[in-house]
């Protein structure tokens, strides 16, 4: 993506975000004191993007990813030729997603699923370690025999390979002797 297109994408996304924040703020500011307006902005960020600053940052990043993904999809399959039309459509769909709290939903459920899979992986790792430990204690003799057989098989393969190399060397020396005599 060239620089002018990046600037245009950034400008459209920023203007759509500002539009989605300013219009409700203007509507809320009609005949209301400044404290209500500040409360409105706090409620807006808490309701749409999460209650902690880290939640807000992650939700904004998810919102940008949604916007970029929609724009990329429209770039590939859209019948619209003008870039700004695709940007406005992607931005509008993203804003609809923000209004219905899609980034917050993705953040909460994605975190829940990732944490669940992480906990499941740790429990599985502990169980496998316990099973391996029990097998090593109980079946120590069997594992030792298996390791010895495996080591013997490896040594046998090496010996066969060395014997083949030696036989090839002897055959080569015999041919060399025949040629020189």
Image (cartoon, helix red, strand yellow):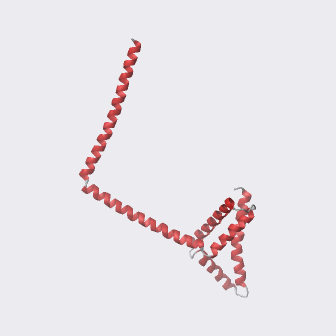
On-image quarter of the N terminus: bottom right
Give the answer, above or below, for where 175 lies relative to 140. above
**The quarter of the displayed image where residue 106 is located:** bottom right
Task: Point out residue 20 in the picture as x, y percentages from the top left corner.
Answer: 69, 75
Q: Residue furthest right?
A: 82
Residue nearest the viewer, comparing 90 with 112: 90
Q: Quadrant of residue 133?
A: bottom left
- Residue 30 or residue 85, whichever sits in front: 85
From this view, report whether residue 68 is shown above or below residue 165: below
Instruction: Return the x and y of residue 136 as percentages of the image width and height.
Output: 28, 55
Left or right of 104 on screen, residue 162 = left
Residue occupying image coordinates x 26% and y 48%: 144
The spot of residue 117 in percent (x, y) is 45, 65
Q: Residue furthest bottom?
A: 31
Give the tally of numbered discs.
0
Which residue is found at the position 31% from the left and 38% from the top?
A: 155
| Residue drawn 25% across the image and 54% down it | 139
Answer with left or right where residue 126 lies relative to residue 36. left
Q: Position of residue 128 (x, y in %)?
A: 35, 60
Above or below for 59 versus 138: below
Is residue 53 placed above or below 72 in the rendered structure?
A: below
| Quadrant location, the C terminus | top left
Would residue 162 be found to the left or right of residue 101 on screen?
left
Which residue is pictured at 35% across the width and 27% down the height? Answer: 166
């Amino acid at each position: 993506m060239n620089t002018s297109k990046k600037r245009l994408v950034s400008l459209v996304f920023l203007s759509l975000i500002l539009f989605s924040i300013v219009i409700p703020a203007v509507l809320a500011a009609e005949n209301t004191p400044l404290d209500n307006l500040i409360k409105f902005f706090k409620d807006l960020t808490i309701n749409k993007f999460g209650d902690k600053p880290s939640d807000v940052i992650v939700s904004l990043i998810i919102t940008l990813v949604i916007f970029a993904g929609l724009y990329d999809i429209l770039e590939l399959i859209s019948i619209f030729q003008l870039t700004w039309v695709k940007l406005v459509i992607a931005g509008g769909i993203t804003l609809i997603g923000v209004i219905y709290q899609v980034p917050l939903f993705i953040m909460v459920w994605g975190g829940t699923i990732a944490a669940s899979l992480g906990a499941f992986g740790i429990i599985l790792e502990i169980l496998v370690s316990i099973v391996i430990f029990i097998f090593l204690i109980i079946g120590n003799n069997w594992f030792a025999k298996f390791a010895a057989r495996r080591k013997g098989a490896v040594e046998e393969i090496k010996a066969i390979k060395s014997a083949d190399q030696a036989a090839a060397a002897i055959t080569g020396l015999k041919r060399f002797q025949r040629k020189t005599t």
